[in-house]
Amino acid sequence: DFWSFMVYDNQTRSILETDQVTGGLDSNSKGVKLNDDGSATVYFGPKAPEGQDGNWVQTMPGKGYNAILRLYGPLEPWFEKSWMPGDFESVK
């Protein structure tokens, strides 16, 4: 099945308005690049890192947001708690 990340505005609780067509990214999105181990690195920020447009979710400078991960059809490791998504890391 698939996963999805969406970003929501902290004040309005609605999808964060940006220049991107959607307020997020999912594993079926065109251009998503997977890592060698099958995982995906997703970038959140006002501008995409060079060469990472397909794995980028746009945010707005000065606007707070919440990122939500949805798993559609999660596998056993999720239910067994042997897999957890990685933490957000600041990239400069």
Image (spheres, grey):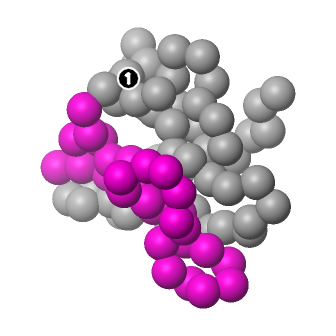
Tell me: residue 58, above or below residue 33. Answer: below
In this view, the residue farthest toward the front is: 19
Give the magenta range.
Answer: 1-30
In this view, the residue farthest toward the left is: 1
Element carrying mark 1: loop
**Residue 87 seen:** no
Tell me: residue 32, above or below residue 24. Answer: above
Q: Give left or right: position of 43 versus 53.
A: right
The x and y percentages for residue 21 are 36, 52
Per the image, the residue denoted by label 1 is 34
At 51% across and 37% down in the image, what residue appears?
Answer: 56
Tell me: residue 66, above or below residue 40. Answer: below
The image quadrant of residue 92 is top right
At 27% across and 39% down in the image, what residue appears?
Answer: 29
The x and y percentages for residue 39 are 42, 30
At 38% across and 23% down in the image, what residue appears?
Answer: 34
Instruction: Give the crowd class for mark 1: few <14, some 14-19, many >=20 residues within 10 Å.
Output: few
At 40% across and 29% down in the image, what residue appears?
Answer: 54
Q: Give left or right: position of 89 versus 54.
A: right
- Please, what is the dominant secondary structure of the magenta stretch? loop
Specify the amino acid type for callout 1: Leu
Nearer to the camera, 27 or 58: 58
**Residue 7 seen:** yes
Based on the picture, tell me whether residue 20 belongs to the magenta stretch.
yes
Based on the picture, tell me whether residue 56 belongs to the magenta stretch.
no
Nearer to the camera, 76 or 85: 85
The x and y percentages for residue 22 are 36, 56
